[in-house]
Image (cartoon, rainbow, N blue to C red):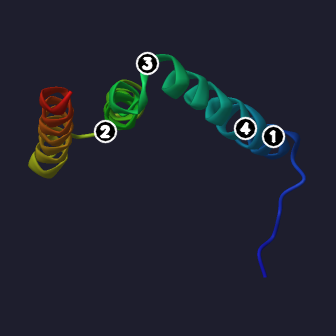
Amino acid sequence: PPVISTAPVYLAGLAYLGIAASAVAFNLYYILIRTVGAGPAAWNGVAVPVVAMALSTLLEGYQWTLTAVAGIALALIGLTIALRAKASQS
């Protein structure tokens, strides 16, 4: 069975993930959707992994691969196409 650590640093990280990184971020995202709409808010779904990978590069020495770059490019292209198609329907 899984073992849960009682170390303060582990519990603090767990609390952060449960409260700030999940509950608060989820509510902020819904505010963003209400403010700018679902289409423009979808950029968040593309931007977050890109920023995470950039931070990982700076802080952890992440090595970019062709697959990672291609994935980011495809995500940006796909979202751009989707938003342009929606804009032309309006």
What residue does disc 4 label? Answer: 23
Q: Nearer the viewer, residue 6 or 40?
A: 40
**Residues under labels 1 and 2: Cα distance?**
26 Å
What residue does disc 2 label? Answer: 62
**Residues under labels 3 and 2: Cα distance?**
33 Å
Q: Are marks 3 and 1 in contact (CB under 8 Å)?
A: no
Q: Are marks 1 and 2 in contact (CB under 8 Å)?
A: no
Between label 4 and label 2, give the one nearer the viewer. 4
Between label 3 and label 1, give the one nearer the viewer. 3
- Badge 3 marks a residue whose secondary structure is helix
The residue sitting at 41% across, 32% down in the picture is 38
Of callouts 1 and 4, the N-terminal one: 1
Crowding near the residue tagged with mark 2, few <14, some 14–19, many ≥20 C-alpha atoms within 10 Å = few
Of callouts 4 and 2, the N-terminal one: 4
Q: Amino acid at mark 3?
A: Val
Q: Amino acid at mark 4?
A: Ala
What residue does disc 3 label? Answer: 36
